[in-house]
Image (spheres, grey):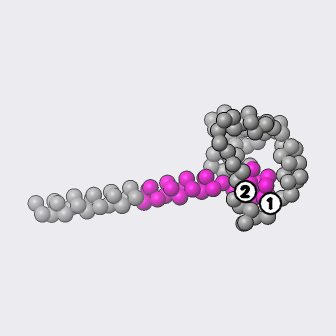
């Protein structure tokens, strides 16, 4: 529901019910860049938020931002950054194809 609105409710659920039969892994990929908070502090901060309504935006305040802020005190999302970079690369690629097409069309007209 949160992807369709701008709010989400923080819940505490067993991993089994959230992941089901899907594969998952622990991802602490920013431990080399940011100092993780102590596990007890992370859990305390998370439990304090249970039941609260939070702002939710896919691009700036999503679940990856949420967990990184809990773990490192830094809200960040590589998914958002990667999507923006991919969109930029795709845009440059389309612009290049359009430019080449225009140049070929121009050369064809000049030869006629």
**Residue at the spot x=66%, y=51% of the render?**
60
Viewer-closest of 92 and 44: 44
Q: Nearer the viewer, residue 67 or 2?
A: 67
Magenta span has 70? yes
Q: Which mark is residue 68?
A: none
112 magenta-colored = no
Q: Residue furthest left?
A: 112
What residue sits right under mark 1 in the picture? 36
Q: Secondary structure at mark 1?
A: loop
Residue located at (55% from left, 53% from top): 83
The residue stretch that appears in magenta: 67-92
Q: Dot 2, how many residues are within 10 Å of its Cα: few (below 14), some (14-19), or many (20+)? A: few
Whether residue 65 can be seen here: no
Residue 47 shown left or right of residue 72 in the figure: right
Question: Magenta span: helix, strand or loop, mainly?
Answer: helix
- Determine contact: label 1, label 2, CB under 8 Å: yes
Q: Residue at x 49, y 58 (%)?
A: 88
> In this view, which residue lies farthest toward the bottom?
33
User: Image quarter for residue 24?
Assistant: top right
Residue to which mark 2 is pinned: 28
**Closest to the observer, 88 or 22:** 22
SS type, badge 2: loop
Residue 48: percent from left, percent from top = 87, 44
The alpha-carbon separation of the residues under discs 1 and 2 comes to: 9 Å
Residue 81 appears left or right of 99: right
The residue mark sitting in front, 1 or 2, is: 2
């Amino acid at each position: 529901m949160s992807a369709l609105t701008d709010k989400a409710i923080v819940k505490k659920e067993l991993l089994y019910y959230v992941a089901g039969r899907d594969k998952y892994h622990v991802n602490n990929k920013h431990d080399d860049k940011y100092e993780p908070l102590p596990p007890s502090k992370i859990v305390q901060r998370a439990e304090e938020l249970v039941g609260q309504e939070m702002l939710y935006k896919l691009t700036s305040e999503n679940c990856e931002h949420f967990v990184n802020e809990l773990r490192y005190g830094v809200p960040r999302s590589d998914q958002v950054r990667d999507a923006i970079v991919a969109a930029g690369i795709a845009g440059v690629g389309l612009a290049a194809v359009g430019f080449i097409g225009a140049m070929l069309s121009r050369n064809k007209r000049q030869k006629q």
